[in-house]
Image (cartoon, grey):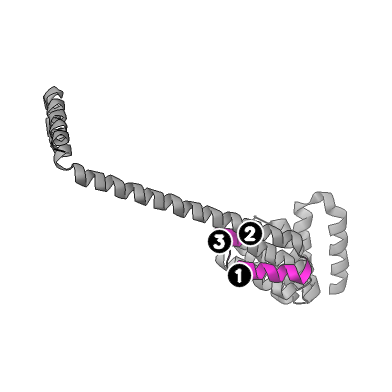
Amino acid sequence: MEDNKQTTHDLIDEVQATAPESIHPLLDFLLRNGKAIAIGIAVILVLAAGFSGYQYMQQQKQVKAQSELGTILIKYSGTKKAEELAAFLTTAPSDMKPAVELALAKAWMDDSKFMKAEAVWAEIAKRNEAMSPVASLGQAKCLILSDKPEEAVKILQALKDKTGDNFTSTIDRLLAEAAEKSGNIQLAIQAYQGLLNNNPSQRLYFESKIVELKTKLN
């Protein structure tokens, strides 16, 4: 044991003797604090391993969630699909929730549960600014299909003021339908006029609708 210690000291002395003078302070620091440095390195390695393990676990959770969503979309239909999506939404990873909500809204619409779909669209519009215009359109369509055109008109008019020229034709199509069903003939004519101006290829249809609606005003 003593021979080993002596050999180690001889080696250290040799390194110090052959090293340039400029790095002697660094060598002295390393030799004096070698144990602390080793412990620090060990801690860093443990933390890095823990972080890698956490990342792996998160990736596995993501893969599992994606697989579960895919199974629901393929395996189920109708009310069962919507119910399974609603249950999955409560545990889905946060970055998957927007996609799950869209799938849920569509599932309720496919099942003709329009007010349930409307509630999902309304939640998306409230919490997801980027998806708000599309969600509001979905919400309005569900209200029209649920015989609540007056509420649809309010949403569409607010959306039109908010989005400006964006989604103009889509908004006007729904607004024309909702306004006509609600008995607001003048607003329906205005919406069809906007469609006529922006979609000349469908001029004959929109002109005929405008003429038809104007006869109801007389």
Q: Which residue is painted at 36% across and 51% down in the image?
A: 47
User: What residue is disc 3 on?
Assistant: 93
Q: Residues within 10 Å of mark 3 (few under 14, many from 20)?
A: some
Where does residue 213 sit, x and y in percent of width and height? Answer: 85, 68
Which amino acid does the dot numbered 1 rest on? Glu
Q: Nearer the viewer, mark 3 or mark 2?
A: 3
Pick whichever, 94 or 207, lies toward us: 94
Q: Amino acid at mark 3?
A: Pro
Q: Is residue 45 left or right of residue 150?
A: left
Labelled pair 3, 2 in contact (Cβ < 8 Å) = no
Q: Residue 43 location, x and y as percent?
A: 30, 50
Left or right, 101 with respect to 215, comes to: left
Which comes before the other along the chain, label 1 or label 3?
Answer: 3
Could you say where residue 143 lies in the image, as x and y percent from the top left? 73, 73
Q: Which residue is mark 2?
A: 99
Any part of residue 153 in sight? no
Which residue occupies 57% across, 63% down? 128
**Distance (Cα) linking label 3 and label 2:** 11 Å
Residue behind mark 1:
123
- The residue range painted magenta reads 77-98
The residue carrying pointer 2 sits among few (fewer than 14), some (14 to 19) or many (20 or more) residues within 10 Å by Cα, namely: few
**Which secondary structure, mark 1?**
helix
